[in-house]
Image: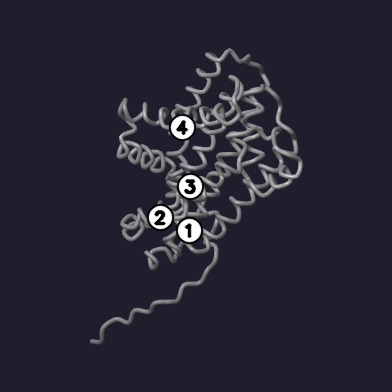
């Protein structure tokens, strides 16, 4: 009796059945939450010192940047420090999503090779972890804002839709870069330079209103610019963000999410071979 013949068909890029795919993803939402918690425990964020460092790291960084601003400009004020802290905390949400997302597929190699599941769960889990890391810093910022004596207003609630846009952008970036890293592993080494460049090009060390008009034209090339400017306006100054900024940030977030998700889903079935 002859041995059975096994045929390996070449990979063809294309989307899977989306309805079945999203239903499978939704049914595993509990796994995403538990997987994210296990990753946080592995990084010791379930301990007191781990949670303290989670807050102290961006807080100390903001203090260093604020000191440099005082040295360079010769003076500053409490509003400037509140702006620096608020925008830096939100920037860390995006940066942590990128850092966790870039290796989410390659780090889950054993899970991918041995289990059938929607691979997009892994970059989603990286963003969930980034959100868990962000929430304590938001509480700390509100405490800092109270200590600085800045007034509270209902306009600060505009920070909620801005945060949702930033989360969608973080998810799109994490999905995109996780897929790119499967094909180009060196991008993880390039990522620190990318995040540092975004830090300096975004209105964090400075406020958008301080830029010259000829430089403001470059803000359309930075997806974080309108988001961070709106975030600072709502949380620090208690002002409603400009509609154009919200729409621009939303367009960036939706565009990156849709393009990155399409690229990810169309290549997902090839990951096991590439890993």
Foreground mark, 1 or 4?
A: 4
Q: By what rule are the colours in the image chosen?
A: one colour
Cα–Cα gap, marks 3 and 2: 13 Å
**Residue 247, relative to residue 116: is it above or below?**
above
Mark 3 or mark 2, earlier in chain: 3
**Residue 3, relative to residue 26: is it above or below?**
below
Q: In the rendering, which numbered label is found on residue 39?
A: none
Mark 4 or mark 3, earlier in chain: 4
Q: Which residue is mark 3?
A: 98
Name the one closer to the observer, 105 or 21. Answer: 105
Q: Which residue is mark 4?
A: 61
**Residue 129, relative to residue 179: is it above or below?**
above
Query: Badge 2, how many Cα within 10 Å: few under 14, some, many 20+?
Result: many
Q: Position of residue 164 (x, y in %)?
A: 59, 36
Mark 2, secondary structure of its residue: helix
Residue visible at 62% across and 34% down in the picture: 206
The reply to whether dot 1 and dot 2 touch (C-beta < 8 Å) is: yes
Cα–Cα gap, marks 4 and 3: 19 Å
Q: Which residue is mark 1?
A: 179
Mark 1 or mark 2, earlier in chain: 2
The reply to whether dot 4 and dot 2 touch (C-beta < 8 Å) is: no
Mark 3, secondary structure of its residue: helix
Q: Which residue is mark 2?
A: 105
Foreground mark, 3 or 2?
A: 3
The reply to whether dot 1 and dot 4 touch (C-beta < 8 Å) is: no
Mark 1, secondary structure of its residue: helix
Q: Is residue 234 left or right of residue 69?
A: right
Query: Badge 4, how many Cα within 10 Å: few under 14, some, many 20+?
Result: some
């Amino acid at each position: 009796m002859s041995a059975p013949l096994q045929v390996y068909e070449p990979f063809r890029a294309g989307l899977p059945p989306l309805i079945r795919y999203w239903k499978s993803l939704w049914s595993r939402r509990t796994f995403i939450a538990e997987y994210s918690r296990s990753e946080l425990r592995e990084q010791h964020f379930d301990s007191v010192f781990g949670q303290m460092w989670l807050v102290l790291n961006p807080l100390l960084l903001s203090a260093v940047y604020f000191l440099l601003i005082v040295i360079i400009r010769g003076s500053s004020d409490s509003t400037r420090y509140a702006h620096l802290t608020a925008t830096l905390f939100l920037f860390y949400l995006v940066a942590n999503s990128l850092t966790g997302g870039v290796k989410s597929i390659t780090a889950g190699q054993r899970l991918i090779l041995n289990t059938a599941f929607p691979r997009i769960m892994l970059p989603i889990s990286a963003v969930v972890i980034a959100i868990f890391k962000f929430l304590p810093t938001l509480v700390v910022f509100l405490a800092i804002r109270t200590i600085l004596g800045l007034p509270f207003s209902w306009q600060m609630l505009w920070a909620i839709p801005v945060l949702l846009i930033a989360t969608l952008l973080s998810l799109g970036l994490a999905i995109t870069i996780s897929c790119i890293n499967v094909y180009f592993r060196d991008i993880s080494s390039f990522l620190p330079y990318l995040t540092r460049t975004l830090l300096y090009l975004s209105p964090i060390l400075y406020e958008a209103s301080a830029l010259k008009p000829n430089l403001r034209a470059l803000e359309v090339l930075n997806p974080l610019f309108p988001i961070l400017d709106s975030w600072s306006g709502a949380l620090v100054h208690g002002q409603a963000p400009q509609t154009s900024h919200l729409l621009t940030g939303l367009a960036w977030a939706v565009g990156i999410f849709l393009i990155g998700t399409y690229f990810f889903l169309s290549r997902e079935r090839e990951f096991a071979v590439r890993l």
